[in-house]
Image: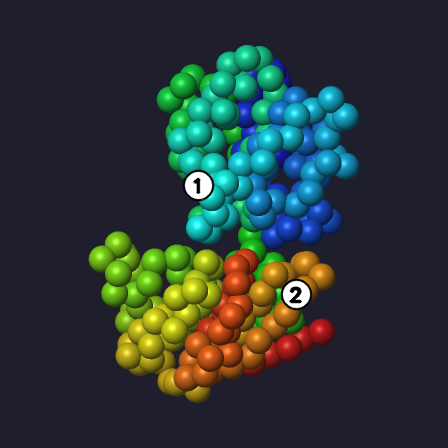
Amino acid sequence: MRTDLPPGHVALVGGGPGDPDLLTVAAVRLLGQADVVLTDHLAPDCATFVRPDAEIIGVGKRPRSTDATAQDDINRLLVEHARAGRRVVRLKGGDPFVFGRGGEEWLACAEAGVPVFVVPGVTSAVAVPAVAGVPVTHRSLTQGFTVVSGHVAPGDPRSTLDWGALARSGTTLVILMGVKNLPAIAEALVAGGLDAVTPVAVVAHAFAPDQRVLRATLRTAAAAAEGVRPPSVVVVGDVAALALG
């Protein structure tokens, strides 16, 4: 794993699901070299890992926020700082390539002639269920898991997911950014063939002091999660009934 950050380079660094203890060794080493850190809203606090003279720029994209930073502006900042000869870390929540737009930022740097590399991070798709005691796979219950975004609701013209096929997949479903659309998602999964009493776990604000886990079924998930706000991860399948730890 690359841990050197020369001037004029950009490192797309996965920060994990929010707990600084889940930063990788490579991430900490790169943060210590950075002149500029562009950090997400859901990335862990990096102040203790950077030099005192490093610049930390918040570029979070909170849902429906008035102070969200547009992706084009983030891309522009990465290129501008790198071209100015700075060592740039783009610290992202989770893993840069799991619904993190890391690919877009890589392409923007590459197209501008800016050297860029990626450092994987611990994805919330696995870590958040784990901290709630829910294994995404478990022998005798499931032989795999499928990770999807619930940001676009079933039935929305923008949706590219086949929720019927997901219902028939026989895998644990891990749904990121889906708590707002959970009523429609649950309905689509039942319509696709999943039993209405299939267990559901909603893990809200994982690794934060207000973390909580809601247990339900597809039939009751919408009511159980009413009022829950992002960040939340939804797990659907028999493993969601487990509470290990």
Around disc 2, counting alpha carbons within 10 Å, would you say few (fewer than 14), some (14 to 19), or many (20 or more)? few
**Residue linked to disc 2:** 211
Q: Residue at x 40, y 31 (%)?
A: 72
* Apparent side of residue 85 relative to residue 23 in the rendered image (left or right): left
Corner quadrant of residue 92: top right
Seen in the picture, residue 122 relative to 104 is either above or below; the reply is below
Q: Where is residue 146 in the image (x, y as percent from the top left)?
A: 43, 63
Say which element carries label 1.
Answer: loop
Q: Earlier in the sequence, mark 1 or mark 2?
A: 1
* Apparent side of residue 130 relative to residue 184 in the rendered image (left or right): right
Seen in the picture, residue 58 relative to 151 is either above or below; the reply is above
**Residue linked to disc 1:** 101
Judge whether residue 129 can be spotted in this image: yes
**Nearer-the-camera pick, 200 or 4:** 200
Around disc 1, counting alpha carbons within 10 Å, would you say few (fewer than 14), some (14 to 19), or many (20 or more)? few
Q: Where is residue 63 in the image (x, y as percent from the top left)?
A: 46, 51
Corner quadrant of residue 56: top right
**Nearer-the-camera pick, 95 or 140:** 95
Dot in front, 1 or 2 = 2
**Nearer-the-camera pick, 60 or 217:** 60
Residue that protrudes farthest toward the front in the picture? 66
Say which element carries label 2.
Answer: loop
Which quadrant holds the C terminus? bottom right
Judge whether residue 34 can be spotted in this image: no
Separation of marks 1 and 2 at Cα, in angstroms: 26 Å
Q: Residue at x 53, y 63 (%)?
A: 229
